[in-house]
């Protein structure tokens, strides 16, 4: 493995660690280019594949869209996606609300929750 590949892997890992939302491979490449100007899209995909195999990265799959990537090991969370600007925001936990939705006699193994609407910026509301 060359030094260049090590720098590229470090750049991708840094981008994912600093990201506050899941990213597309293209987003990762654009951000990684501020660290390693020559990183290609193919290299980003290759690095993501390796990080997925090592379980250092997880995918976020929105219905009908290509996968997004985020650093593994985060606490349980869900997402709010703005329909207008497409920005994603993490929503922490689910306070056991999901357990109450499971029919009696069923066993819940996993879940994903995606909330959709308009963010504060798109609604023009500046305070929380």
Image (spheres, rainbow, N blue to C red):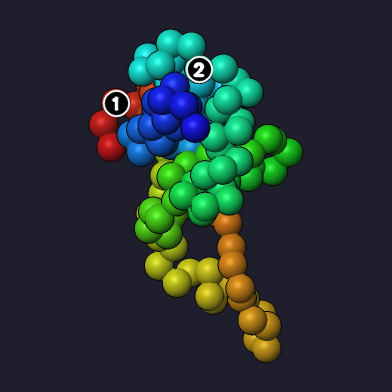
Q: Mark 1 highlights which residue?
A: 126
Q: Residue at x 42, y 59 (%)?
A: 76
Disc nearer the start of the sequence (2/1): 2
Where is residue 59 drawn, in percent x and y?
A: 57, 46
Q: Position of residue 106 (x, y in %)?
A: 68, 83
Using residue 66 as the reference point, say whether residue 37 is left or right of it: left
Task: Specify the farthest residue to the left.
Answer: 127
Secondary structure of the residue carrying numbered label 2: loop
Foreground: disc 2 or disc 1: 2
Q: Residue at x 45, y 72 (%)?
A: 96
- Residue 86 seen anywhere in this rendered image of the structure: no
Camera-nearest residue between 51 and 120: 51
Note whether 103 is above or below 32 in the view shown.
Answer: below
The circle on residue 39 is: 2
In this view, the residue in front, 95 or 55, is 55
Residue lying furthest top: 37
Residue 83 is drawn in which quadrant? top right
Q: CA distance from mark 2 to mark 1?
A: 37 Å
Task: Say which element carries label 1.
Answer: loop
As rendered, which of 53 and 93 lies closer to the eye? 53
The residue carrying pointer 2 sits among few (fewer than 14), some (14 to 19) or many (20 or more) residues within 10 Å by Cα, namely: many
Looking at the image, which residue is at 53% across and 75% down?
99
């Amino acid at each position: 493995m060359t030094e260049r590949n090590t720098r590229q892997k470090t750049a991708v890992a840094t981008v994912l660690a600093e990201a506050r939302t899941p990213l597309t491979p293209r987003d990762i490449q654009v951000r990684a280019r501020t660290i390693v100007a020559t990183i290609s899209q193919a290299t980003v995909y290759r690095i993501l594949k390796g990080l997925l195999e090592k379980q250092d990265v997880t995918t976020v799959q929105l219905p009908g869209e290509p996968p997004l990537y985020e650093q593994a090991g985060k606490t349980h969370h869900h997402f709010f996606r703005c329909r207008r600007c497409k920005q994603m925001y993490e929503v922490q936990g689910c306070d056991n609300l999901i357990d109450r939705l499971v029919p009696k006699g069923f066993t819940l193994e996993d879940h994903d929750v995606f909330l959709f609407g308009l963010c504060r910026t798109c609604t023009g509301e500046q305070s929380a």
